[in-house]
Image: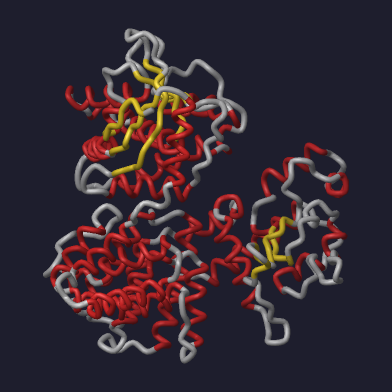
Amino acid sequence: MIDSVKDCAVSSLLGVDHKIVYVIPPYQREYTWSKSHWEDLIDDVLGAPEGYFLGSIICINQQKDATDIAQLELVDGQQRMTTLSILLTALYSCLALRKDNLDEDENASLINLRRKLVLKDPTDHPRLTPQRQNNNAGDYVAVLREAGVVKQHKSKPGNLGNRRIMKCYRYFVDQIEARLSIEEPAHVQLLKMVEQVSAAVLVKIEVKNHSDAYVLFESLNNRGAQLTPIDLIKNKLLASTHGKDALAVEAVFEEWMGIIDLLGDDYSLQERFFRQYYNAFKEVLNDVVNEPVATRSNLIRIYEKLIEHGHEEFVSRISAAAEVYSQIAGGSRSSENPALNAALIRLRRAQGAPSHLLLMYLMTNQGRLNLTDGDLVAICDLLVAFFVRRNVTGLPATYELQRLFMAITHQLHHGVGEPIFEMLRERLVGISSSDELFREKLAGNAYEDAYDMTRFILCSLAEASMTDETRVDLWAMEGKRHAWSVEHIFPQGANIPASWVDMLGGSPEVAKAVQAEHVHTLGNLSITRFNATLSNKSFLDKLDARDSNGNSVGLKNMLRINDDVISESTWTKQHIIRRSQRLVDAAFNYFRLK
């Protein structure tokens, strides 16, 4: 059934002297990876100290003549291969911009990078051919053209910038440029990045036909989850009691399960805790482990050393940290500190998970650092303002956040000569985007650029004006969705209802222009009770809409954030602009860092 199984570096899969191309068959789904996947891939590959393992791919080798191009049909792994190829394309683009700085050997590396993307033949045949669904194939070639990998001989597909493949390419270009430091020439750093990506490893499985591929694919997926790093750490811990009586092993197992119970069932949260535990307390653990930072690739190695040094001390320390982390990450609450609980909830909603390593350090050492619960609340609110700004502007880059909070814990460990809050604010202001960029992003297409953060901003502004009599839970869930959702006042759908076209003067072109420029801005957004039928109603109907139970699901819902909407009888471009200015000012002041 299986022709071959090989561990292959990316440089081998896309070998410059190999006539191999990868074709994604038309029955495969379209390219679906999004920003969170792109972030993980670039952080993992460029952050790994050695070749990072990216999983497996399954191919059907369709080559009939050994002298022809070997066309491998990619039946599993298209998301990874497509994203890797786009990352290499982005690196080529950034490196080609600095071509004048390259010496002869470095220029040869640039040429070899191009040959990882297109075959060494007159046709510049792409190494990867996505399927045509949602214009994937055309978009991918357009990315190669924009990067200069192939010649500009065709027009760009319509709406190219709004689809995932071009967004992925531009995201990688921005991330690569953001990672360049002034400490050494940019082209040297770029060549090192190319080497890191080229060294990443995949298991390449080749089969004879589609039937074999299907059987193998089903077998791999039905065999159950592979052992995770957390499983392996547990096994190492239990093995450390080898030679002791059964009661000792059972006691260690109970302690381990206590840690997992505190963290909950979410594996990603469990893994993040184990990484952040080491990164938070690295200064204390350095006498046992000397890894610069905990990553997915070295997590097992770190914890093997910690357990070998003394499993009883390890369990004691990490159990205490897990109890604190559970409160930070939402697994438990401390009823004695309702203000702190509320502040931690706000930080989680602001996507502040990278700061959990700092808070774990602060709360574990609260007595030594002379921090009151009120100090911790103020620090949480400061972090909320930082993460709102960060997630709206994209600055600082994701990979910088871990380094930032590790540096702060390092400073705290060795003593701080000023109040901790002031030190934190100074560090956060120093790394954050400018006020001007924050305002610019708030005034832009906030919903499209950062949906979750836009919802958080709108809910925060709405909550700020609530009284005890008008207070409602804007974060309540109905099933798997929020009971309250972001509503576009002017509808965002492609088919603009006639009532809205008429209100804007009767011209569909004018209505589309207003929609294109303003529909996703803060001024056109509100919070209403969820109602799937609300979006295309007329403006007046949106004001008074109610569900079948008579509950208000329209804009007249007692939220003060809607006061300047419900007082109007029409909703035009000018109304949106005026409200945008007010909400931008309100959000800027509410989440002010300085």
Q: Position of residue 393 (x, y in %)?
A: 48, 55
Apparent side of residue 124 relative to residue 285 in the rendered image (left or right): right
Apparent side of residue 265 relative to residue 233 in the rendered image (left or right): right
Q: Is residue 594 visible?
A: no
Instruction: Establish if 246 lies above or below 162.
Output: below
The image quadrant of residue 87 is top left
Residue projecting furthest to the left: 287
The image quadrant of residue 102 is top left
Residue projecting furthest to the bottom: 336
Apparent side of residue 587 relative to residue 129 in the rendered image (left or right): right
Q: Position of residue 17 (x, y in %)?
A: 26, 17
Colour scheme in use: secondary structure
Q: Position of residue 523 (x, y in %)?
A: 68, 59
In the picture, the quarter occupied by the C terminus is bottom left
Instruction: Establish if 213 lies above or below 368.
Output: above
Q: Is residue 88 visible?
A: yes
Residue found 23% across the figure and 73% down from its top = 411
Instruction: Establish if 245 lies above or below 174.
Output: below
Residue found 68% across the figure and 81% down from its top = 471
Residue found 46% across the figure and 46% down from its top = 222
Instruction: Establish if 357 lies above or below 451.
Output: below
Q: Position of residue 319 (x, y in %)?
A: 30, 78
